[in-house]
Amino acid sequence: MIRYVVKRLMMLVPVLFGVTLVSFSLLQIVPGDPAVLLAGEDANPEFIEAVRKEYGFDQPLHVQYLRFVARAVQGDFGISIRNREPVIRLLLQRFSFTVQLSFLSILIAAAIGLVAGVVSATRQYSLFDHASMVGALLGISMPIFWLGLLLMLVFSVHLRWFPAGGSGELRHLILPAIALGAASAAVIARMTRASMLEVIRQDYIRTARANGLRETVVIYKHALKNAMIPVITVFGLEFGYMLGGAVLTETVFSLPGVGRLMVEGIFQRDYAVVQGAMLLVATTFVLVNLLTDIAYALFDPKIRYE
Amino acid sequence: MKRTLLGATLVLAALLAFGPGAAQAQTVIYAAGADPDSLDPPNAESNPSEAVNRMIYENLVKFDAKLNLVPGLAERWEQAPDGLSWTFFLRKGVSFHDGTPFNAEAVKYFVERMLGPEKPSRAGLYTPFVESVTVVDPYTVRMNLKTPFAFFLNNLAHSASGIGSPAAHKALGKDIARKPVGTGPFKFVEWVHGDHLTLARNDAYWGGKPKLEKIVIKTVKEDAARVMMLQSGDAHLAVRLPAEDIPRLEKDARLQLDSTETLRVLYVGFNCQKKPFSDVRVRKAFNLATDRDSIVRNLYRGRALPASNIVAPRTTGYVPLPAHPYDPEKAKKLLAEAGYPNGLKARFISPMGRYPKDYEMAQALQQQWKQAGIEVSLGTMEWAAYLAATRKPVDQTDVEIFLLGWAPSSAEARWILYPLYHSDQWVPKGNNRIFYANKEFDDYVDKLTKATVQAERDKYLKLAQEVLHREVPQIPILVTKETIGYTKKLKGVINSPLELTYFDQNTHLEK
């Protein structure tokens, strides 16, 4: 197991190297000059030159790239051309925020998704089943920004239960977590239902029932645990995406997460920020995938990593 | 699993128990549309930064609400008869937020920083004009100019001329951009990028203790979210309200809406060195085929003014000129005269979302021009690419017609006439993106720049604007309006025509 984890972690190196190369090249291909953009409509050529020099944009591309990699290895991602803040500080600030939002969202998604999925499966074709599957369809199809605005209109403007935006306290996170978690809840619900339906038709479930076990024990201990493998896969993917930043949710609710940092960085040609954020997101995604694989083994002892 | 579900429910219940926090007295929440960039005035390039800087820093000379020049940190000033030096008599008893005294040395330090090797982005306000600065006595400072400059005081009142603490700049260098120290009514507390920026009252403010205790400026990018924060009471003030929401917000009895005519003119520019746009008859045909009234009425619902001049009416040095008529038939005739009896085809680009309804306006223009036989293909680019495309030198550019906006941040007409039209300002050196070159016009601009007498300055301002009205190297379309909304309890909000919304020591919240 430990050897497996170490091996997987080693794989991070080529992945991250690839990410730096791709993100650097993409940023170079996109038209637009960071210094010109910073200077705005009434640009002053001397200032543009000074900015290019200060941030090294006047150097040949391979020099810029190698310099970036050399510094990144030492944990220095440069400073933002926008606000002169060290990128590492921006990343940590934004990431701690994204982690909070992601945890709350995945918690909500898992709670709703698992309950709906299990109940739908055990009462297949019941009214609840139909209702929850229609709900799941809505959850998947609803554009997140629209759901977010709708939640804000109802719960902030009309009912005044939650603030309409901003961050700082937990109550600021509830509506965004629901908006962000809705689609994941839907996916988890559908996956749980499908997987459960398969499992409860297995022989060992019939055996468990024949042994006179209580139905709740049969469902939650014997069936659900075995049905969890595909659900965990989905769970891991959804969580990975959330940790990669939720730009729409963050924008609608004015939250300072990694997603907005990266997208705004792209629009502002803030190369250092975009590259730093890409590295962070890639690392997180790989790690979440690794955790997912480890979780398989916890739920299914048949799976071993040697 | 049951335990997990139970846990999740408990967490949710705990979260719900947080009620909305009681708002602190005299704390104002300001919903801005974007994060500031630099809090160092000489390097600040965006309106959100300038609005914050106006509360932290002060200038020698200030703009009042009508953009008249009034005393700021200088109580009065004198211009030498030859126009080559200005003497400023400074206010006494002022200190920066870090305790450094404000005096002639601080002014000298600031101006020399502008002139020096650091090359701040707004150095251009000083380098072409200022030769040196001398401390006459601790509270008198003299600026010696290379050449007389008619609008020198406007440059001193520009947001970039907010004077910072020399001690803080010596200690922090360029990083003063995120730890600003000025003399203004509010001082910097913290800045969480992309989230909020907090200012607190400067109890030692020379103009009296400010009434607001704290200002929290939140970055709220999404228009709809800003509107909802205003309606739900989560923000006391919101800027850049979208036109669609304004009629509805106007009906809300708790809210005050304030629409201010800005100095920004949205215009269409041509590559004047390229056929057929080098022919004034073709440019006039475009102008005649443009129905400004319809655009203002239908697209902007009256929240803009049709423009006949690239200089907006509230700009110092504005000259009223006759409105450009809408006459597609005459446009066709002119095109025929110019050798295009069957109309012409061209490429037109517009930004999308940079200015209110910019791309929609471009679409409207496309339709209007069609009536005169002009077929333009309309394209758009994201802003960074757009700026880059319209900054290419004359031998590389493939831009034919473009849409852009311009507002003189020093509130005077030269900041339009010189950078946009003077022949030594062709991009990429300056901002003449249309490659306009007219000796007569250049001469007027040079003369108005050096005028030491106002009558003389105004004479050449008029002549220069008349040339543009006649030659239409760019078509001014409209003057924008900036609408902000705030709770009626908030009094003394400053909504400047410079597209800046800020507070001063008198702004307060009524109980």
Image: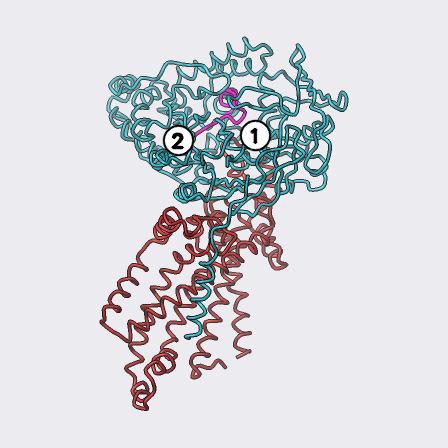
Which residue shows up at 60% across the image and 50% down it?
A86
Q: Label 1's element? A: loop
User: Which of A194/A179 is in front?
Assistant: A179
Which residue shows up at 32% across the image and 24% down it?
B292
B414 is within the stretch colored magenta: yes
Farthest residue in the right direction?
Answer: B137
Q: Label 2's element? A: strand
- For this view, does A52 lie left or right of residue B423? right
User: Which of A5/B251 is in front?
Assistant: B251
The location of residue A165, given as percent across then percent down, is: 45, 48
The location of residue A236, given as percent across then percent down, is: 43, 68
First in sequence: mark 1 vs mark 2: 2
Q: Colour of chain B?
A: cyan
Depicted A68 relative to depicted A269: above or below? below
The colour scheme used here is by chain
Say which amino acid is labelled 1. Asn
Q: Which residue bears the numbered disc 2?
A: B403
Chain under numbered label 2: B
A155 is within the stretch colored magenta: no
Chain under numbered label 1: B
Which residue shows up at 37% across the image and 36% down it?
B252
Q: Which residue bears the numbered disc 1?
A: B506
Region in magenta: B397-419
